[in-house]
Each structure stands twice: as structure tokens, then as C-alpha cells.
Amino acid sequence: MGLRDAFRSMRMRDPVDVDAQVVSTTAPPDGATHGTAVMNLVVRPPGMEAQSIECTSVPAPVAKWPTPGQTLPVTVDRADPSRCKVRWDDVPEWDDMAKQQAAQLAAQMNRGGAGGDHVVMGGNADVNDIVAALQQAMPGAEINVQGMEVQGLDATAGPPGSPGDDRVVQLERLARLRESGALTEQEFEREKARILAQ
């Protein structure tokens, strides 16, 4: 935990652990193990409406760098949800996340029978996220998910949210947040403009 996070957590009057939806984040620093992550998050503390907040985390580990669409464990102050702290110890590294998603996909395909023509996706990941994770975990492997349409994937792309990530995927996630009521129209337009300017 960085000094800034420690200071923020000391000031929290009513801290509560919640899952935050990452809408946007700054890019990780090149050639460093840690950096400053400035994130736009949507949080919903118990008994409160969903809120859009900006959360700055210092230091944020590059191996666990957040990406748009990811669910991130945070602690927020119910008295002032803009006071937040990312619980980095509870965030898996990209390599571990890719392996876990690959294992989940394999188990789901095996439950669907030898033909593998029926895959039930669960959790926060959609088929594109899981295939992207598989491509990262097994570079050069041919990924074929039968009966599922896989869009917006580039075999040379890095983890979701990297510079090679498809802006369309980010915009679709943003639209889902707006439709769910987690983002206002103004917040949606601001984030949409930011993504298109990348």
C-alpha cells in the first residue's frame, strides 16, 4: 500500500469493500514495475446508488494494471465514495488471470461434451475476453470456439486494455454501463470521446 492510499484509508469514516467496474485508466509506465494509475470507476456501496468516481492509486503494480471492463476490488468511504483504495493483494496478475480463464474455458467446453458445440460463459468475462486471455497465455495458438462468434480480436494484441486492444470493445463496454444506469449520458460522452481520441 502506498503512502497516499494509506493516508486516504486513515481518513475514511465508513470504509466498505466493494467491487468497482473500471471504465477507463491511464496507461502503465514503460519499463517500470509500478506506476500511478488514475482510474474512472463505477462503484455501488451497499445501500447506495451506483456512483462514478475517479480513483488514483500509488503505487499500482504494472503486472496487475487495471483495464476497462475489469472488475477491481476496492475499499471506499460510504461517507465520501471518492475516497478509495484498490486492494492490490486481491488482484491477480495478468499471467495468473489468463491461466485461470483458460482453465475455466476448457472446463466449460468439456462440460459441453466431446463435440464442444455449446459453451456457457460465466462470471465477468465474455467470450472475447476469454479468447484474448487464451491468446496471451498461448501465443501463436489457434483458438477455435465452436458455435460462438468471436469478434474484435487480433492475435498480436496484448492483454485487454493494451494499446492493441480494440476500441470497439471498450465502446461496447461503455455503452453497457450507460444502459445499466451506472453512467450518466454526460459521463458516457466524455469517456467515449477519450476512447476515440486514443
Image (spheres, helix red, strand yellow):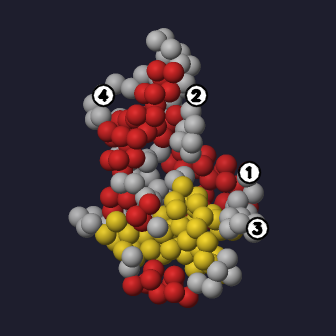
| Residue denoted by label 4 | 141
Three-letter amino acid code at the position of disc 2 = Val
Three-letter amino acid code at the position of disc 1 = Glu
- Other-residue count near label 3 (Cα within 10 Å), few / some / many at <14 / 14–19 / ≥20: few
Q: Percent x, y for residue 186? A: 71, 66
Q: Which of the pair 53/166 is nearer the observer?
A: 53
Q: Tell me, yes or no, whether the two marked residues, 4 and 2, touch with CB atoms within 8 Å.
A: no
Q: Earlier in the sequence, mark 3 or mark 4?
A: 3
Task: Say if 161 sits above or below 106 in the image.
Answer: below
- Other-residue count near label 1 (Cα within 10 Å), few / some / many at <14 / 14–19 / ≥20: few
- Other-residue count near label 4 (Cα within 10 Å), few / some / many at <14 / 14–19 / ≥20: few
Judge whether residue 152 can be spotted in this image. no
Q: Tell me, yes or no, whether the two marked residues, 2 and 1, touch with CB atoms within 8 Å.
A: no
Three-letter amino acid code at the position of disc 4 = Ala
| Residue denoted by label 2 | 120
Three-letter amino acid code at the position of disc 3 = Gly
Q: Quadrant of the N terminus?
A: bottom left
Foreground: disc 2 or disc 3: 3
> Which residue is depicted at the point 47% across and 45% down?
166
Which mark is drawn over residue 179?
Answer: 1
SS category of the residue bearing label 3? loop
- Other-residue count near label 2 (Cα within 10 Å), few / some / many at <14 / 14–19 / ≥20: few
